[in-house]
Image: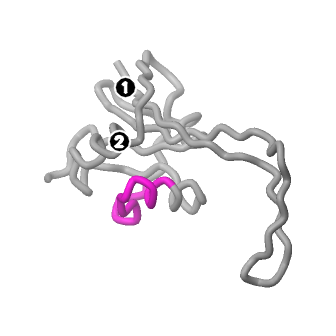
Amino acid sequence: MAKSELPLLLLDNASMSTVVNEGEFKCTMLTFEEAKAIVEMHGVDDVIRCFSGDPLETVVFNYLDINGKHFEYKKITNMRSGQDAIAFKTYVTPSETQPVIMTKYDSQAKKIQNIYVYCQLISKA
């Protein structure tokens, strides 16, 4: 697929705060299946990943079975009218239990947080 003038943007919490800064936006909650379908409707050249090196990147793309490393990385500071984005947002809560496990490095690790991820489709009017 040829590069679009309005590529789909993939965002996390931090990149969303710089991309969604001026204008009117519509936000719609998505399931992971819907997010995957939207990403797959676009070609690799029609998706821009606006976050990098975040553990979220590996976890979300593995969960969705999408190879995110092929998406171009670019820091975007403003969405254009008619452009869509999918935000992978994290929601962190303290852990009610704090089990201790042994790591592969033979050290102890303690669970201190629960991290949840949810998806939103953001469209700029």
Three-letter amino acid code at the position of disc 2? Glu
> Which numbered tag is attached to residue 105?
none
Q: Which residues are magenta?
A: 60-73
Mark-to-mark CA distance, 1 and 2: 18 Å
Residue 55 percent coordinates (x, y): 60, 59
Q: Which residue, given by chain and number where applicable, does mark 2 sit on?
A: 33
- The C terminus is located in which quarter? top left
Say which residue appears at 30% left-offset and 46% top-offset.
Answer: 39
Q: Is residue 12 above or below residue 19?
A: below
Q: Which residue, given by chain and number where applicable, does mark 1 sit on?
A: 123
Residue 40 percent coordinates (x, y): 25, 49
Lateral position of residue 27 relative to residue 83, left or right: right
Can you tell which quarter of the image residue 25 is in? top left
Callout 1: SS: strand
Residue 16 percent coordinates (x, y): 54, 36
Lateral position of residue 20 relative to residue 100, left or right: left
Say which residue appears at 42% left-offset and 23% top-offset.
Answer: 28
Three-letter amino acid code at the position of disc 1? Ser
Can you tell which quarter of the image residue 63 is in? bottom left
- Upstream in sequence: badge 1 or badge 2: 2
